[in-house]
Image (cartoon, helix red, strand yellow):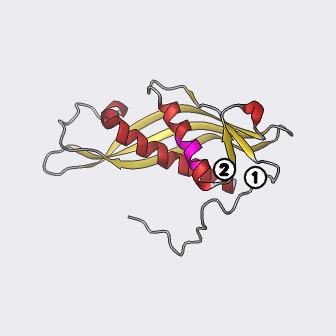
């Protein structure tokens, strides 16, 4: 477990490099270019929740009612087993990698406020060892625990993306 105290982190939502004229952000449902069903919806919902929790921006879904528009495309998702139970040989931890294209555009000036065509989100997740070991480790085996696993992934991804946008990395 990593503790971040004293590492130069600030209270969330207090620092932003977005222009002062941005008050409302439209978060358009991400496009899904993968075969993973509804991943784009979960990621979009998590990004909306993260913006609401960490910032004072008004978040809407209609770009016509916004000062800036956030768009994203999920271009790939993959998993790999990284830790195994020594006794059973079953995977206990999976590394999930999500590839995305993300942009935030100022509606008035058409300036790109944030863009990353190679946004890479990578995070390890523990998986249940009580179920039978899958014959091959892939995305579907990780997502057999769909709701909890996808929920954790979406929350962690959203925190990473919103931080990147607010801090303009």
Q: Is residue 19 left or right of residue 33?
A: right
Q: Position of residue 1 (x, y in %)?
A: 38, 64
Q: Main secondary structure of the magenta part?
A: helix
According to the picture, the residue beneath numbered tag 1 turns out to be: 18
Q: On the image, which quarter does residue 135 sit in?
A: top left
Q: Which residue was labeled with disc 2?
A: 165
Q: Which residues are magenta?
A: 46-50
Q: Is residue 49 magenta?
A: yes
Instruction: Point out the residue furthest to the right here.
Output: 109
Pointer 2: residues within 10 angstroms few (<14), some, or many (20+)? many
Residue in view at x 34 percent, y 30 percent: 140
Q: Secondary structure at mark 1?
A: loop
Percent x, y for residue 89? 18, 45
Residue 29 vertical position relative to residue 164 in the rendered view, above or below: above
Give the farthest residue toward the left.
87
Above or below 161: residue 117: above
Percent from the top left, x then y, of residue 52?
Answer: 60, 49
Residue 61 visible to the viewer: yes
Which of the two residues, 77 or 21, is positioned nearer the viewer here?
Answer: 21
* The quadrant where residue 144 appears: top left
State if disc 2 and disc 1 touch (CB < 8 Å).
yes
């Amino acid at each position: 477990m990593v503790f971040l105290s004293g590492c130069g982190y600030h209270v969330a939502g207090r620092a932003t490099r977005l222009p002062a004229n941005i008050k409302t952000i439209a978060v358009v449902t991400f496009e899904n270019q993968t075969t993973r069903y509804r991943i784009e919806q979960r990621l979009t919902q998590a990004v909306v929740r993260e913006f609401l929790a960490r910032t004072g921006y008004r978040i809407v879904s209609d770009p016509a009612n916004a000062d800036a528009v956030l768009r994203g495309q999920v271009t790939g998702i993959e998993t790999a087993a990284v830790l195994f139970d020594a006794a059973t040989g079953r995977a206990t931890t999976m590394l999930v990698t999500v590839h995305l294209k993300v942009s935030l555009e100022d509606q008035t000036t058409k300036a790109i406020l944030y863009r990353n065509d190679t946004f890479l989100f990578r995070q390890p997740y523990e998986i249940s060892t009580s179920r039978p070991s899958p014959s091959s480790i892939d995305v579907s085996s990780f997502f057999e625990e769909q709701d909890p696993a996808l929920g954790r992934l979406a929350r962690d991804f959203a925190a990473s993306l919103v931080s990147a946008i607010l801090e303009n990395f």
